[in-house]
Image (cartoon, helix red, strand yellow):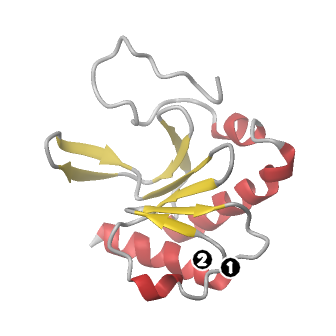
Amino acid sequence: ERCRRYDRTVAGPKSRPNDADVGDCLAAIPERRRHDALRIDELMREATGEEPVIWGTSIVGYGGVDVSDPGRGARSWPVIGFAARKAEFVLYLHAELEPERFDSLGPHRRGVGCLYLKTLDAIDEVALRGLLDRSVELTRM
């Protein structure tokens, strides 16, 4: 159990906000990665002006927006968020970020709406801030 186990007896999507303590969740991240998690938390708070909430079992989300999900209808999702997975951090961003915004970021990989980072050590923080700010802007349009 990372932060809070999802109650499978409750119908509906697994990734929804809950009352798990964000501080406890961040403290549960292994020490060698906790500094990066706290920095990502700080950057996302600045980008959104929102306090974080745990979504599902381990996503730290900032703000909320209703999105249309083909085949599932409308659902809520964080404006931006992240999860500290075993091997890397997953940052949940707007799926339509311009590809050139990633050019100066540093070592990363991408999926649709996801940015995967192993560590912040080699990441250009100015480029990361730009991605977060642009993602928030696109989501709130």
* Foreground residue among 4 and 121: 121
Q: Is residue 13 above or below residue 63?
A: above
Label 1 neighbourhood size at 10 Å, few (<14), some (14-19), many (20+)?
A: some
| Residue at horizontal 36 percent and vertical 11 percent from the top | 9
Q: In which quarter of the image is residue 85?
A: top right
> In screen coordinates, is 14 left or right of 109?
left
Taking the spot 60% from the left edge, 83% from the top edge, the residue there is 127
**Left or right side of 140 for 120:** right
Q: Label for residue 125? A: 1
Q: In which quarter of the image is the N terminus?
A: top right
Position above or below: 82 against 17: below
Residue toward you, 40 or 101: 101
**Position in image of residue 118 (x %, y %):** 69, 60
SS at circle 1: helix
The x and y percentages for residue 3 are 63, 29
Q: Is mark 2 on a helix, strand or loop?
A: helix
Picture residue at 79% right of the left edge, 52% below the top: 33
- Residue flagged by tag 1: what amino acid is it? Glu
Q: What residue type is labelled 2?
A: Leu
**Distance between the alpha carbons at the discs numbered 2 and 1:** 5 Å
Task: Tell me, yes or no, whether the two marked residues, 2 and 1, touch with CB atoms within 8 Å.
Answer: yes
Residue 25 location (% of width, % of height): 68, 37
Placement of the C terminus among the 4 image quadrants: bottom left
Q: Mark 2 points at which residue?
A: 128
